[in-house]
Amino acid sequence: MPSESPKPAQKVTLGRLEKVDLRTYWREEEAEFTPWLAQEDNIRLLGDAIAMELEVVSQGQQVGSFHADILCRDTASDRWVLIENQLEPTDSKHLGRLLTCAAGLNAVTVIWIASDFSPEHRAAIDWLNQITQDQFHFFGLEIELWRIGKSALAPKFNIVSQPNGWTRTAAIAQEESLTDSQRQNFNFWNGLCVQLDRRGSIVKPGDPSMKDYMSFAIGRAGFRLYASANIDDQELTVELALSGEDAKPHFYLLEEDQEAIEAEIGTLLQWDDQTDPQECSIYLSLPEADPNDSERWPEYYQWLCAYLEQFHEVFSDRIKRLNANDYHPPVDYSFNPLKSISLPDT
C-alpha cells in the first residue's frame, strides 16, 4: 500500500501594509510632531534617510519675528541644519518661512518635511539646489505612517528632492584644474564612498575628498573619524580624532577603558595624547599599503570599511556619554614644594 504524501505546512497569512493618516498620531504640528522629531532616535531616523548625522541644538529658535522648528548641527561639518515641519501638504507660507529662517541662521542645509509635496514646491527645491553653491543643500521629504493589521505605527521618510550629488561628483572628477594627486585622491575616496553605500554602512560618507584623508561623522561635535591613505609612508590609517578644550580629559577617560575597547575592536590601537592641548587621537594603521596601486584598492576599501565601522560601533556610544568633569588628573605625590624653596643661611 503506497504511503500517503505529507501534507504541505500551513503558511502564515501575509498582512497588508496600511497607510495611516498623520493626524491619528500627531494631532498638532508644533506641540506633538516637532518634539517627537527632535528626540534622539527619531532625528537619527531622519538622518539615516538623507545620509547625515544630526544633533539637535534647539526647538522653536527665534529668528526675527519667526520661529525655526528645529535647529540641528551636522556633526560631519559642524554646520547648521534647519528643519521646517508641516503635517499638511506644502504651501508657500512654509516655504517663505523656511527661506527666511535659513538666511537668518546662516544654515547651509535646509530640510522641509511635509505630508505631501506639490509639483511646484518640489520644483522650487530642485531649483534651489541648482542655483546655489555646492556647500548649500536643500531636501524635501514626505513623512508617512504605516502599519500592518493592529501592529504599532511605523514612520517613514521619503525623499522627493535632494542635492544632485552624483552629477556634482562626476563633474568634479572631470575638472581640468585638478592636479594628478587631487584627481587620484578624489577617485580613491569616491570608490570608498561607493563601497560604504553598497554595504549600507553605519558610517555615512559625504563628498569624496581631494586630499589624502577623508573625515566622517561619529555623532558628537569635537569627535571625528578619519581615513587616510599616505603615499609617502605607504600606509592606511583609521583614526578617531578628538579636538577642543575637553580633548585631553575625554581622551584620558576613554583610555581608562582601553583594554575593553581594544578587545571589542579585536586589535591593539595607538593612543596619542599629542603635544597640542586641544588635540588627541586613537588610531590603527595598515603598513606596506601603496595607494598608487589601484589594483589593490578593493583590498584597501575592505580594510578601511571594516575598521571605520568597528571604530564607529565601539566608540559612538562611549563618546556620547563622556563628561569632561568626570576626569580627575592623578596627584603627583613625588613633588615636594619645600624642596624648591631656598632658605637663607643662618
Image (spheres, rainbow, N blue to C red):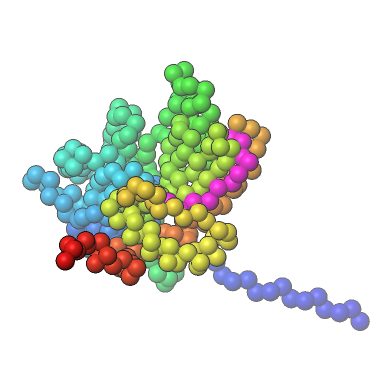
Q: Is residue 5 magenta?
A: no
Asked if residue 305 lies left or right of residue 176, the reply is: right
Where residue 242 appears, x then y in whole percent?
A: 37, 52
Residue placed most toward the observer, 307 or 158: 307
Question: Considering depth in this image, is 42 or 5 the residue closer to the camera?
Answer: 42
Pick whichever, 122 or 49, lies toward us. 49
Q: Residue furthest bottom?
A: 1
In the image, 217 versus 240, the foreground residue is 240
Q: Is residue 281 left or right of residue 102?
A: right
Q: Position of residue 222 (x, y in %)?
A: 33, 51
> On the picture, is 165 further left or further right than 181?
left
* Residue 21 place in picture, x, y as percent: 32, 60
327 to 284, vertically: above or below: below
Confirm whether residue 89 shows in the render.
Answer: no
Residue 132 vs 61, above or below: the answer is above
- The residue furthest top is 176
Vertical order, 186 against 340 (above or below): above
Q: Is residue 149 visible?
A: yes
- For image coordinates 47% across by 18% down, the residue present is 176
Name the dominant secondary structure of the magenta segment. strand
Does the segment drawn in magenta span residue 289?
A: yes
Locate the C terminus by quadrant.
Answer: bottom left
Residue beneath the point at 52% across and 45% down: 237
Relative placement, left or right, of 64 versus 255 is: left
Residue 143 x %, y % = 34, 53
At a point 50% along the width and 54% down the height, the residue shown is 270
User: Could you tell me which residue is drawn at 30 percent across and 35 percent down?
Assistant: 136
Residue range of the region highlighted in magenta in the rendering: 281-291
